């Protein structure tokens, strides 16, 4: 499932109203960096604003509004606000479940882990055990 969102901000600079917006694939950022990007530099770049300008500082003083959400991220946008932390946790969990589903299909011929909750739980526990073991080393 792809996660897209529009980030927008409106502000005034030298008496002019500036409306900056950008459409983003959150999956692209999550896959490459493991986190949601800082939206202000992306908005500045997409709208030809210098990040070392007073104009950019004025933009940063405003709240970013989020809209046109698609995918899992729709559950984390409320009244134009994005719960970045909750989305990140859910995205990582969803990604893990997709990976476990792929393993179950390839190794065990199980095509839907949702129908086998005990197996799903066992795979999650094995993953957690492996992750904790690596952290302790």
Image (spheres, grey):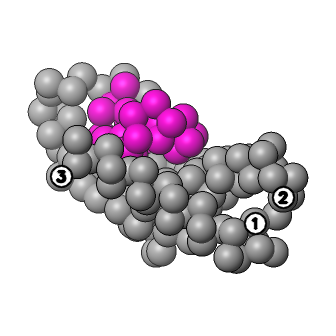
Q: Earlier in the sequence, mark 1 or mark 3?
A: 3
Determine whether the residue tagged by mark 2 lies in a helix, strand or loop.
loop
Rendered image: mark on residue 110: 2
Quarter where residue 129 is shown: bottom left
Disc 1: CA contacts within 10 A as few (<14), some (14-19) or many (>=20): some
| Residue under the image location 69 percent in, 69 percent down | 119
In terms of depth relative to the viewer, which is nearer, 70 or 101? 101
| Residue under the image location 46 percent in, 30 percent down | 32
In the image, residue 115 lies at what x, y percent?
Answer: 81, 75
Residue that carries the numbered disc 3 in the rendered image: 61
Q: Is residue 48 left or right of residue 1?
A: left
Q: Are marks 2 and 1 in contact (CB under 8 Å)?
A: yes
In the image, residue 101 lies at what x, y percent?
Answer: 72, 54
Q: Earlier in the sequence, mark 2 or mark 3?
A: 3
Q: CA distance from mark 1 to mark 3?
A: 46 Å
In terms of depth relative to the viewer, which is nearer, 20 or 33? 33
In terms of depth relative to the viewer, which is nearer, 5 or 12? 5
| Residue under the image location 26 percent in, 47 percent down | 135
Q: Vertically, is 46 above or below 29? A: above
Residue that carries the numbered disc 1 in the rendered image: 113
Start-end of magenta stretch? 16-45
Q: Is residue 122 left or right of residue 89?
A: right
């Amino acid at each position: 499932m792809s996660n897209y969102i529009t980030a927008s901000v409106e502000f005034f600079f030298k008496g002019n109203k500036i409306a900056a917006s950008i459409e983003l694939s959150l999956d692209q950022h999550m896959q490459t960096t493991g986190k949601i990007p800082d939206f202000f530099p992306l908005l500045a770049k997409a709208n030809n604003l210098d990040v070392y300008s007073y104009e950019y500082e004025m933009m940063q003083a405003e709240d970013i509004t989020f809209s046109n959400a698609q995918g899992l991220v729709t559950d984390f946008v409320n009244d134009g606000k994005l719960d970045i932390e909750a989305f990140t946790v859910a995205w990582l969990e969803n990604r893990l479940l997709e990976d476990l589903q792929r393993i179950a299909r390839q190794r065990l011929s199980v095509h839907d882990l949702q129908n086998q909750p005990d197996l799903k739980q066992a795979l999650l526990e094995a993953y957690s055990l492996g992750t904790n073991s690596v952290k302790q080393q």
